[in-house]
Image (cartoon, rainbow, N blue to C red):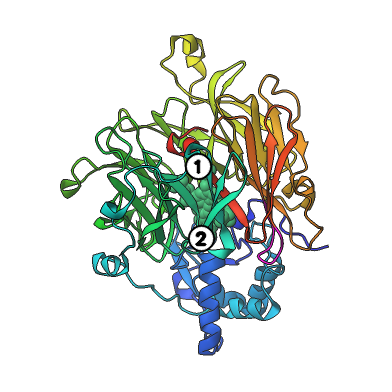
Amino acid sequence: MKQRLLMAATFWTAATGLALNIVTAQAAEKLPDAPAMTAEEKATGKRIYFERCAGCHGVLRKGATGKNLEPHWSKTLPDGKVQEGGTLKLGSERLGKIVAYGTDGGMVNFDDILTKEEINIMARYIQQTPEIPPEHGMKEMMASWKLIVPPDKRPKKQMNKYNLKNVFSVTLRDSGEVALIDGDTKKIITIVKTGYAVHISRLSYSGRYVYTIGRDGLTSLIDLWMETPAVVATLKAGIDARSVDTSKFKGYEDKYAIVGTYWPPQYVITEGDTLKPLKIVSTRGITVDGDYHPEPRVASIVSSHIKPEWVVNIKETGQIMLVDYSDIKNLKVTTIESAKFLHDGGWDASKRYFLVAANASHKIAAVDTKTGKLAALIDTKKIPHPGRGANFVHPKYGPVWATGHLGDSVVTVISTPSDDPKYAKYKQYNWKVVEELKMPGAGNLFVKTHPKSRHLWADLPQNPERELAEANFVFDMNDLSKPPKRIEVAKDAGLPEMKAVRRAVHQEFNEKGDEVWISVWAGKKDPSAIVVYDDKTLKVKAVIKDPKMITPTGKFNVYNTQHDIY
Ligand code: DHE
């Protein structure tokens, strides 16, 4: 039986199978030429690389959470020896096997996603010199900006009868769309065209506008007040992107948006209600180790509630930037050193501290947005991946924030500070890992709870075992010593058996905090679903299915996203 991968850490940490050689500089061997490729094959390789590989290995292929995939690379070690490696050394046959079957070190297998011919193309493509994609400055952004409905032509009040607070913005990954679903009736309100494989949706302070960001950098602004909510502006902020947020501080409500891009490595500040680009800031620079990096990508961004600031996390440099938007002509940025490679994260319950995964360092970095300093760098098990994490009051340790792990079978629980005198006795635990809740395997992507819930939900979509990837695990916060209850999400969805794993991914609470929505993410051509559970009884309340609902993944409840409730 083919193993999807031994460690579920995989899809984030690819291609450890690539050989390394320690040699002296003089002994460097002559490498073969890159294999021949037709223009058509190169175009296919380029597309697949962008869709499947760039997220982990980087556009320049210098590696991040995935390995370096340049044809040849070398670096000088502290003892003066030169370490060399590269795809040319490995050759097409070996690379083809790595792409097809993955490696023990974490590279995911692609033989169930790509055809044999595509695998062969990829094995040859990554031996070619990486193309440097074009820059995307103000000229390109202005040319791409589309103001479809100007603010003065938009409604002055809500023109529909939906309970907007309980609307869910759902990523339909492979169709390049977002479905807006009425959380009360569970009916699809509308499906709007967006960028390719939207990563996240974020809300404006007022809750009127949804901002989505496609992997292709296309940012879309959706007005929920229209009779049928629709896209009112778009901006191509770059070529490859994952993050967007808005200004939430008093006096700046709905005024600005910020879009972070993987390529070019930069962020752009735009008008909040039009997406007109105002200022672009490059993130190229020096890593926490003191080396220059040409492609430090913008990972998570979050908007402060206590200052006119965004927390912008730079993946490859390990630097956390506090971007003060009170005067964007004279922009002040505080740069906080943490660890590599910064990825996703969320607020603690007080919304003073932002906790972000430095996944290659197996650490969580906590920033104090009040003092503008690093509050803590906490060692965890392998590859923390919190999504936005989960805040709750632990029966023994008080206020805590939790993260799951791609690389280990635990949910890590970290004590967080609180100004509330009733939690003063827990101060001794602050920033310590107070508990590691046992999961049945590695491969977690998201954990979720709600202030009104006593349940902590955790998924395992990247686990190699189908049965685990298709389920969710629910901890009872009143007694965390009990093993989590297993919820058979894919079975509950009532979908037919299929070749593709029906991954149960990403949980989101409704506005009231009494329902949990989980996506069943199958193949592009397979039926998918969202299963809605009653959070108290853990019983199925509804299954949302529709032929138009293709590959649902992330779900963002308007109220919870607007107020950062998790
Ligand atoms: Fe994500 C959040 C990057 C693959 C679903 N993902 C994030 C964030 C980043 C990121 C930087 C934080 C954004 C923020 O808060 O501002 N994700 C990446 C990648 O680089 C990676 C590893 C590879 C890639 O090529 O994109 C990747 N992510 C995935 C998926 O394959 C997932 C499971 C399915 C999908 O839709 O693509 C996926 N990522 C998500 C979701 C969130 C997310 C649902 C938001 C979680 C939340 O609750 O806020």
The residue that label 1 is drawn on is 162
Q: Is residue 486 visible?
A: yes
Residue in front for this viewpoint, 333 or 474: 474
Q: Position of residue 541 (x, y in %)?
A: 71, 37
Please give left or right for residue 137 compared with residue 36 in the image.
Answer: left
Q: Quadrant of residue 156?
A: top left
- What x and y, as percent, mark residue 407? 64, 46
Residue 495 percent coordinates (x, y): 77, 54
Residue 342 makes an appearance in the image: no
Residue 430 at x, y percent in the picture: 48, 21
Asked if the stretch drawn in magenta spans residue 107, the answer is no
Say how many tags the image has: 2
Amino acid type indicated by mark 1: Tyr
Q: Are marks 2 and 1 in contact (CB under 8 Å)?
A: no
Residue 402 - label: none
Q: Is mark 2 within 8 Å of ligand 1?
A: yes
Instruction: Please give the name of the residue rendered at 41% of the width and 62% of the height, measured from the top-left corner.
Output: 218
- Disc 1 is placed on an element classified as loop
Q: Quadrant of the N terminus?
A: bottom right
Q: Is residue 240 above or below residue 504?
A: below
Quadrant hosting residue 419: top left
Position of residue 477 relative to residue 36, above or below, is: above
Location of mark 2 (residue): 55
Say which of 398 and 233 sits in front. 233
Q: Residues within 10 Å of mark 2 (few under 14, many from 20)?
A: many
Q: Nearer the viewer, mark 2 or mark 1?
A: 1
Secondary element at tag 2:
helix
Q: Which residues are magenta?
A: 520-527
Amino acid on which the number 2 mark rests in the picture = Gly
